[in-house]
Image (cartoon, coloured by chain):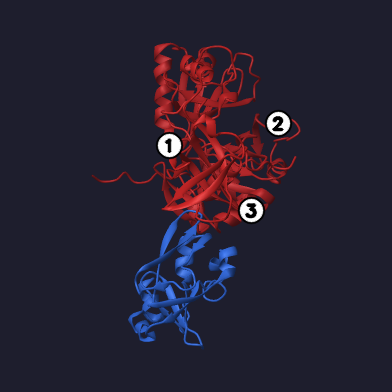
Amino acid sequence: MTQQPLLRTSLYDTHVTLGARIVSFAGYAMPVQYEGILAEVRAVRTGAGLFDVSHMGRFLVDGADAQPLLNWVHTGNINATMPVGRARYGTICKRDGGIIDDAIVYRVSETLWMLIANAGNKTTVFNWLGYWCDERFPNAIITDSTDHLAMIALQGPKAVELIAGISTFDPAMVKPFNMFNATIEGDHAALIARTGYTGEDGVEIMPHAEEAPRVWKMLMDLGAVPCGLGARDTLRLEAGLLLHGSDMNDTINPIEAGLQRFIAKEGDFCGSDVVRGASESGTKRTLVGFRTLERGPVPRAHTSIIVDGETVGDVASGGFSPTLDMNIGLGYVPPRLTALGTALGIDVRGKMVDAEVVALPFYSRPR
Amino acid sequence: MDIPEDRRYSKDHEWALVDVDGAVRVGISEFAAHELGDVIYVDVPAVGTRVILGAQMGEIESVKAVSDLFSPITGEVIEVNAEVKSKPELVNEDAYAAGWLIRVKPDDAGELDQLMDAAAYQTATE
């Protein structure tokens, strides 16, 4: 069977020219690193880093039923009075509570909404929205604008001042978890959302796809450092942010994944009866953060967690944190082992590594 | 990428250099370090361990990958680079000097003739 050729974002040539190491990710040819993952992580934590995240799904939802549709599929409080410009994070669940994707919903205008989905779940989420539209919310129009708009994440303590300097985006007016319909120097229209996946302040910039290379270059000229998917994964893990596919999937519900605070409403949503039931009766497994007691081999996904000689769970994500100079990770354990400081053993390629449960996030930006 | 002429290279990208005391110093090439990316952990055999030419002797771990280390020489480990244990990034910064991994007392230094010289390694990594 021949493989499908990899898709490319409008920034592909830019990445190649910059000498990026390109890998396959969610069907796209994407940069995993430029200068090096650790240097890129440092750049984001101390200045500003640039990420091409155009491969993620961007769905526009319009029409009289747009808000009720999104409020039904998403655990966030996507209500009629949600302010224009506001962004809300939550999960999209199946009827049995399993997480299809985590996603942010944005109110772009009075009538226009946007949902941004993980690249790997685009088709599933788009079809899910379409299913519920047909089933219950017919007066909604769902448009896939993934190819029409690019998305560039600019993240770090200097990010917001950088974008403010070259656009109509005003950080005093657009607080975190809000978005703005901006114009970037050179007359580029772009949605700019003050959201991100790194634990730093910053923005996600959505210009028209063909203008992305110009916007990228402007930001690089101002000192933003190109960063790839490798750095992105390290940064999000340090910030205690979950990755669908690793830390949650459609067999795991938001309570197990520690996401109950994003069930932000009293009313029903798809899966709410199961999810609320789990919240009351408890779960068999819970996501915790851990760190190893020494630098050593890294406990990565699927390694076993062992307590008193018994396998009690497994690691969902793990990696080295250059910011904290230690190995950190997320894993599923029974609720009795979730207290901070609980000792865990992790079998890394036959070697038992000592770890302990720690609070999330591992890293918080200074405020 | 630098390929110093003063040493030999294995097909698994280790280099072997005879020190003035006759021991063989071992590390990984710049090519290998570059392929791996940022090294974050190195696991090498302890002093006193016997290593065998071509046999797995440890692991080198980067942010994204773990790679086996294979010994380019048969003999006994007489020294381990303590600096690399605490600063694994030395392998990326200085693969041929400060990033050395172990020193081995060889059974037979002639084994190194089985490895590639710089020119052959250059061709192998093109």
Q: Position of residue A39 (x, y in %)?
A: 60, 57
Circle 2 residues within 10 Å: few <14, some 14–19, many ≥20: some
Of all residues shown, which one is farthest toward the front? A308
Q: Which numbered disc, 3 or 2, marks the residue that appears first in the sequence? A: 3
Pick whichever, A35 or A342, lies toward us.
Answer: A342
The chain in red = A
Q: Position of residue A190 (x, y in %)?
A: 60, 35
- Quarter holding residue A105: top right
Residues at marks 2 and 1, CA–CA distance in whole angstroms: 29 Å
- Identify which residue, A174 or A208, lies in the foreground: A174
Front disc: 3 or 1: 3
Callout 1: helix, strand or loop?
helix
For the residues carrying marks 3 and 2, which lies nearer the camera in this image? 3
Calculate the distance from the C-alpha at mark 3 to the C-alpha at mark 2: 26 Å
Label 3–label 1 contact, CB within 8 A? no
Amino acid on which disc 1 is placed: Gly
Tell me the chain of label 2.
A
On the image, the x and y values in percent for residue A249 come to 43, 32
Query: What residue lies at 44% left-to-right and 76% top-to-bottom?
Result: B15
Residue where numbered disc 2 is placed? A174
Label whose residue precedes the other's in the sequence (3 or 1): 3
Query: Callout 1 environment at 10 Å: few (<14), some (14 to 19), or many (20+)?
Result: some
Q: Colour of chain B?
A: blue
Chain of the residue where label 3 is placed in the rendered structure = A
Instruction: Residue type at mark 2: give it.
Output: Val
Q: Which amino acid type is shown beneath numbered disc 3?
A: Arg
Residue designated by label 3: A42
Using the image, determine if residue B99 lies above or below residue A304.
below
**SS for dot 2:** loop
> Which residue is labeled 1 in the image?
A120
